[in-house]
Amino acid sequence: MLRSDLDPDRDDVAKTMAAASSFVSDFLDSLPHAPVSGPDVVPSGLHAPPGEQPGEFDALLATVADAAARAVETASGHYFAYFPSGGLFSSAVAELLAQTVNRFTGVSAMAPGLVALERSVLRWLCDEFGLPAGSGGLLTSGASTATLSALVAARERAVRAGAPLDTLTLYVTTHTHHCVAKAARIAGLNPGQIRTVPTTAEHRMDPEAAREAVAADRAAGNRPFLLVGTAGATSTGTVDPLPELARLATDEQLWFHVDAAYGGGFVLTDRGRRILRGIERADSLTLDPHKSLFLQYGTGALLVRDTEALRAAHAATADYLQDVDDDGVAPDFADLGVELTREFRGLRLWLPLHLHGVAAFRAALDDKLDLAAHTDRRLREFADVPLRPDLTVLNFRAPGGGDTGQARDRANRELLARLNATGRIFLSSTRLDGRNTLRMCVLSHRTGRAHVDDAVELIRDGIEGRLP
């Protein structure tokens, strides 16, 4: 049998897999003791182009290991910046399987069995969020791409109802993720069509202020079409008053979108379901399983109440697709989003959920809520903590820091730099109430009580001047 030069034989596969398995095991074993931030100097060898002759896998693997070490260790239990994404080994194995069989899943007829697996996960997610029969969606590279598809669907519904594009207005807050504004720009709206609604003292969208903004736009001849609520803001982790916003959207016939990229996974827990009450009334919602379901980066989801709204905004066809036309049972993924060519993302969710069981994810998320509450209590012993956490994002500042706002900001920037320079933890920062504020997110499945206690003691040392 003829074999391509690019295909290994069975012995080569076994040898390569053994080396890769050793790399994975060594990496996972090193995580508990690895520094959270590695060297950031990139040696010239990492810029080398490929050669004409074959390379040695072991040498190439060593290069990959060196390149990967020159990074912030986002897989560490001591990583608390942005939104930790530790990555599950089972999901990595799923990716190996999915990329090996390399099926095309943009059109259901090309791989109906694998598409069925992916759709089963989407149906399960819809059920968990309380969306009705007929709801659905697709897996994406992340919530930003999912947001674009949701916004385009909302725009198309409004335009088809007779609203001129340049009259459309949408409603966000200062804590709405910037991917919404980016999606609006890509979808043909200008910045002047985005209304920033005031927030309450707890940094949540003010429903009455939103209602007033909608009324003012209608009076001015504009066409309000989209209201965006946030279920876990990036800066603060706070959740907007979703029931009140859903009521406003219904009253004003607005498309109600909920950004649950971070907070959505907590719907698996009893506490999270209570906090996210009202999300079941969304017309669309975004979720990043690479955040609160612990999966690898590049795993997003868009769920919609009406899949036909997505199809109406995204479907396209051509003569050369006549052999793989939609069978009418369910729309093809390529008809629901911006991607035509898409990888098979479903297995990276399907395999971990079936292998570990949903209860394991629920328990891990409950543990993160407990750890965040514990960390909040401890930080309040010595730091300025402006908010109670809704979920697992914590904000704090060094107390005092001088008489001026600039001096206080400088003190907190210096504190963050000293903490991260230790290599023992990694935090991020934001601006809250006009002040530089440190930010800690407890989310990695590898983070336990010892990790947060170590972090708290290091933060205390930094605030009390015991760090270099």
Image (cartoon, grey):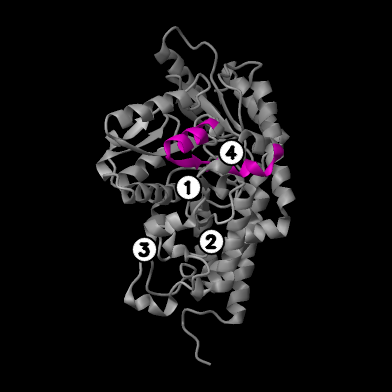
Provide the residue designation for mark 1: 143
| Spatial CA span between label 3 and label 4 | 33 Å
Q: Which structural element holds mark 2?
A: loop
Provide the residue designation for mark 4: 79
Residue 263 percent across, percent down from the top left: 57, 39
Residue type pointed to by label 1:
Ala
Residues rendered magenta in the picture: 244-270
Q: Earlier in the sequence, mark 3 or mark 2?
A: 3
| Spatial CA span between label 2 and label 4 | 26 Å
Residue type pointed to by label 3:
Pro
| Spatial CA span between label 3 and label 2 | 30 Å
Would residue 237 be seen by someone viewing this image from the given angle?
Answer: no
Residue 41 percent across, percent down from the top left: 43, 44
Q: Nearer the viewer, mark 2 or mark 4?
A: 2
Q: Earlier in the sequence, mark 1 or mark 3?
A: 3
Would residue 155 be seen by someone viewing this image from the given angle?
Answer: yes
Residue type pointed to by label 2:
Arg
Q: Earlier in the sequence, mark 2 or mark 4?
A: 4
Q: Earlier in the sequence, mark 3 or mark 4?
A: 3
Indicate whether residue 387 is drawn in magenta.
no
Classify mark 4: residues with Cα within 10 Å, few (<14), some (14-19) or many (20+).
Answer: many
Q: Identify the mark at residue 49; answer none if there is no mark.
A: 3
Q: Nearer the viewer, mark 3 or mark 2?
A: 2
Q: Nearer the viewer, mark 3 or mark 4?
A: 4
Provide the residue designation for mark 2: 345
